[in-house]
Amino acid sequence: MFQRSPRKSLRHASSEVGISKSSVHRIMKRCQWRSYIPRLVQAFNDDDPDRRVQYCEWYLGRCNEDAHLPTKIVFSDEVTFKLNGSINSQNCTY
């Protein structure tokens, strides 16, 4: 089944065959196969390096104006921001 459609999820495969998802996962592990996990990644554009430099210059300028600016920003790895505007707060990648 996975050779015909390698992008099939464990959930779809288990419902198609009629066995539990954990059994499908265990069988795949015995066969040394890995489940397919789709991931959205950000595409890099030609102007990205210029935009990054522009942002860094803007940020440094703002830090010179307001010395407390870095303490007003919260950095976290708990949320994934996507290019289409959706936010995944479950710390998962689709």
Image (cartoon, rainbow, N blue to C red):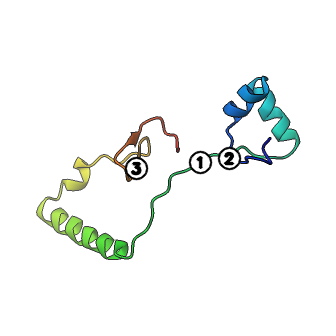
Choose mark 2 or mark 1, whichever is in front: 2
Q: Residues within 10 Å of mark 2 (few under 14, many from 20)?
A: few
- 2 and 1 marks in contact (CB < 8 Å): yes
Question: Where residue 13 appears, x then y in whole percent?
Answer: 73, 33
The N terminus, quarter of image: top right
Q: Secondary structure at mark 3?
A: loop
Q: How many marks?
A: 3
First of labels 1, 3 by sequence position:
1
Q: Residues within 10 Å of mark 3 (few under 14, many from 20)?
A: some
Question: Where residue 59 appears, x then y in whole percent?
Answer: 23, 65
- Closer to the camera, 91 or 60? 91
Q: Residues within 10 Å of mark 1 (few under 14, many from 20)?
A: few
Amino acid found under the numbered disc labelled 2: Arg
Answer with the quarter of the image where residue 49 lies. bottom left
Amino acid found under the numbered disc labelled 1: Pro
In the image, taking residue 16 as reference, residue 74 lies left or right, namely: left
Pointer 3 residue: 82
Answer with the quarter of the image where residue 26 lies. top right
Pointer 1 residue: 38
Q: Is residue 66 above or below residue 9?
A: below
Pointer 2 residue: 7
Name which residue lies at 67% across and 38% down.
Answer: 9
First of labels 2, 1 by sequence position:
2
First of labels 2, 3 by sequence position:
2
Q: Is residue 29 above or below residue 69?
A: above
In the image, taking residue 82 as reference, residue 56 lies left or right, namely: left
